Amino acid sequence: MSHTLLISDLHLTPDRPRASELFFDFVSRIAPRAESLYILGDLFEYWIGDDDLQDEFNAAIADALGSLSGKGVALRYMHGNRDVLAGRAFVERCGARLIDDPTLLDLHGARTLLMHGDTLCTGDLDYQKFRAYAHDPENQRKFLAQPLQERKKQMLGMRAESEKSKQVKISEIMDVAPAAVDRALREHGYPRLIHGHTHRPAQHAHVVDGHTCERWVLTDWYGRGGYLRCDDAGCTAVAM
């Protein structure tokens, strides 16, 4: 049966070899049978610019996806918060097409809204301020104008600060805000919603204005990893 696969939050890095092994197994053994693969952000632990494709690890990931798209699998890529700087060179090397966040589409007969998910976490005000800064084109231009090693140093520093700040945040504010979810569903005509970012994989049912809407949260790959498989019969979460 024709089907689509969706993944997010792999956070690939040489420091986590098990996740990389699962990724290469996924793109070589599982994904080639799909009609399309949607990556909804945070494929990498961080991305500091397309000139970092010279890195052996980054090149291997991009080339594995390029091999997959070369087999006829339609590859779609959405920016997350860790890979907002992924640009044309990276996407073209993967053989992918960049899609907007959010994207509304017909997915095997069901109107489906795809998001990374971070814009739904409106209770985390500090993060939303940083997100606005990171998505500003001028700030991106200034960052990318710096030498590669300086960018890496800064990114690692930002990652360390982010992890430190999470230790003192209330858990609930790092999850989606129910009002933000309801608003997104209402604005897009009460579709099914699929997103990542929160690392809280689950299937939810939201009743908005009398409409019952599915919400699927994709799993991260810090543990076993996994993906969502959608076809004419609906969606199923599958562990690796």
Image: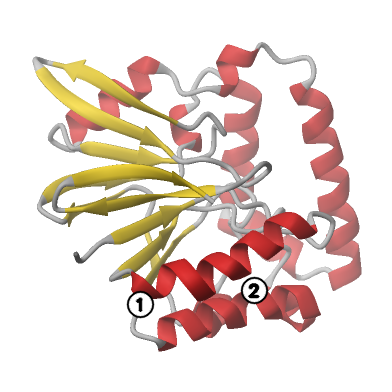
Q: Which residue is mark 2?
A: 61
Image spot of residue 149 (x, y percent): 90, 68
Q: Circle 2: is it few (<14), some (14-19), or many (20+) Cα within 10 Å? A: many
Residue 165 visible in the displayed image = yes
As rendered, which of 97 and 61 lies closer to the eye? Answer: 61
Query: Looking at the rendered structure, which numbered label has been put on residue 73?
Result: 1
Q: Circle 1: is it few (<14), some (14-19), or many (20+) Cα within 10 Å? A: many
Q: Is residue 172 left or right of residue 45?
A: left
Number of marks in picture: 2
Say how the picture is coloured: secondary structure
* Disc 1 to disc 2, C-alpha distance: 16 Å
Which element carries disc 1, helix, strand or loop? loop
Q: Quadrant of the N terminus?
A: bottom left
Q: Amino acid at mark 2?
A: Ile
- Residue located 24% across and 30% down the image: 214
Image spot of residue 138 (x, y percent): 62, 58
Which element carries disc 2, helix, strand or loop? helix
Residue 86 visible in the displayed image = no
Q: Height in image: 164 above or below 234?
A: above
Image spot of residue 67 (x, y percent): 51, 85
Q: Height in image: 139 above or below 179?
A: below
As rendered, which of 21 and 125 lies closer to the eye? Answer: 21
Residue lying at the far bottom in this picture: please name it: 70
Q: Is residue 92 left or right of residue 24?
A: left
Image spot of residue 226 (x, y percent): 51, 48
- Residue located 19% across and 27% down the image: 213
Which sits earlier in the primary sequence, circle 1 or circle 2?
A: 2
Q: Height in image: 102 above or below 179?
A: below
Q: Amino acid at mark 1?
A: Val
- Residue located 58% across and 68% down the image: 25
Q: Is residue 222 left or right of residue 147?
A: left
As rendered, which of 15 and 179 lies closer to the eye? Answer: 15
